[in-house]
Amino acid sequence: MEESSSRNHGLNMTEITLTEYKTQDFQPEEIPTSIGKTIHQNYSQYLEIKEPSFLSNKPWQLTPKGYIGTIPVTPDFTIRILPKTEIKYVWQMLDYVENLNSLTIFEQLTHCDRLEDICDYLAQKLAQKVLSRAKQGLYRSYLSENDRLIASRGKIQWHQAARSPWEIRLPCRYNTHTSDIPENQILLWTLHQLGRTQNLLKAKTKTQLRQAHHALQGTISLTPFTAQDCQNFTYHRLNQDYKIIHQLCNFFLENLTPSHQTGTRKTLPFLINTAVLYEKFVHAWLKKNLENKYFIKAQEKYQFTDKINYQIDLVLYERETKQAIAVLDTKYKTPEKPSHADLNQIIHYALLKQTKRAILIYPEALPYAVDQLSENIRVQTIPFVLNDVSATAGQQFLTCLFSQEKIPLNKEDLEKCHPSGETTSQIGASSLPP
């Protein structure tokens, strides 16, 4: 893993490197006051920044809040945030979550050590697939339009014509066969947004993106879209190849964050929320590998009052009875022990769903793992480890999840669930660990 650094790239070009969740110090000369102010005003959602103090002689302190990627603070100053884990595990999660197996991302980038590599590779694939489809002919569909025409077309709207008999043109409703449809508009919007990034893509990739943009420009309208819009399309034999293209669009639109910079030159940060990525990865893995008699829901909304609702990370159900078996909450941080807030929250979720299992999931086994009863609810910390053999880690997680139905647990099961830490198993204890 790279150490924190500040280095120049040519004349007046500076890049500093951080690691997620890790506080790093920089001297006042490394971060000008104007840059620090811009970071605080525009990017405090992603970075915690503390300014130097001449009283305590403290330097700048920057702490990423759980994002990895690049932030072009100005055209001349870029922040690069590295993951706390090995970068290949991020590829592994992305490959699983984004369902891009046909691109063999993980195999292509196993030995890469930069987030920019995955972005560049995917941007190349997007440009190539858009260009290929443009040469083949873009998918077209019929859209209903209303217009006043000299010659009748489609169906004349007589009730409108009667209200303005002096009009020479006839109000008509007709269908037109066009490629200017959302399926193609979202491609142009994604290419447009990628064109606004800085220090993310190689020159060759940028050239390919411009070529793809040019292939669509003129016939396709530039219309804003969100990542969620990528989920709204249906596919059939005429547009089946659009599915992977839209998945690529989803990846970029989800992680390209709108810039708050003012002025004529606007750029976009590329940031991946690793806590959200980890949650999606665990959900995707469980959804694929659970036994058929179970199913799992993500981000389930529970309406507490008219104005208050909760969103539970994961809820495990029994398919036949539709009964909640367990509530699960993923935590990407790896503290020594779970916080009181996290414990209280997961117990509350279990009470809401009327289940006896409440599980906190971590990417590593905690030094102080929990397995206790509270309010007649079994509270556990179980690791879903990120490593070279995610399938093995997933199966171990399932073993821990389903082999502990009886109380008390035997020592072998506890050690299997929490291999690297000390486990508390005071079943029936009235209080949670300190």
Image (tube, rainbow, N blue to C red):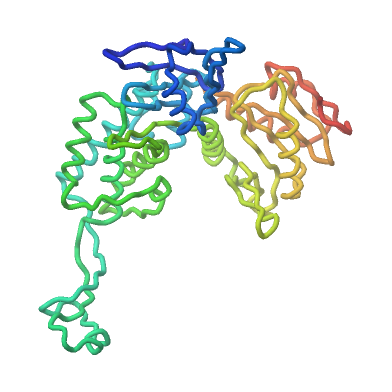
Total count of labels:
0
Relative to residue 414, is residue 233 drawn left or right?
Answer: left
Give whichever of 116, 279 is nearer the camera. Answer: 116
- Name the image quarter holding residue 118: top left
Image quarter for residue 202?
top left
* Above or below, comparing residue 431 to residue 15 in the picture: below
In the picture, which quadrant includes the C terminus? top right
Q: Which residue does the image show at 57% across and 15% down from the upper left?
A: 53
In the displayed image of the protein, which residue is found farthest to the front? 55
For the residue pair 128 and 40, the one nearer the viewer reads as 40
Q: Position of residue 236 (x, y in %)?
A: 31, 54
In the drawing, does residue 272 fall left or right of residue 434? Answer: left
Task: Note whether 185 is above or below 162 in the view shown.
Answer: above
Q: Position of residue 54 (x, y in %)?
A: 56, 12
| Apparent side of residue 5 relative to residue 196 in the rendered image (left or right) | right
Identify the image quadrant of residue 327.
Answer: top right
Determine if residue 387 is in view. Answer: no
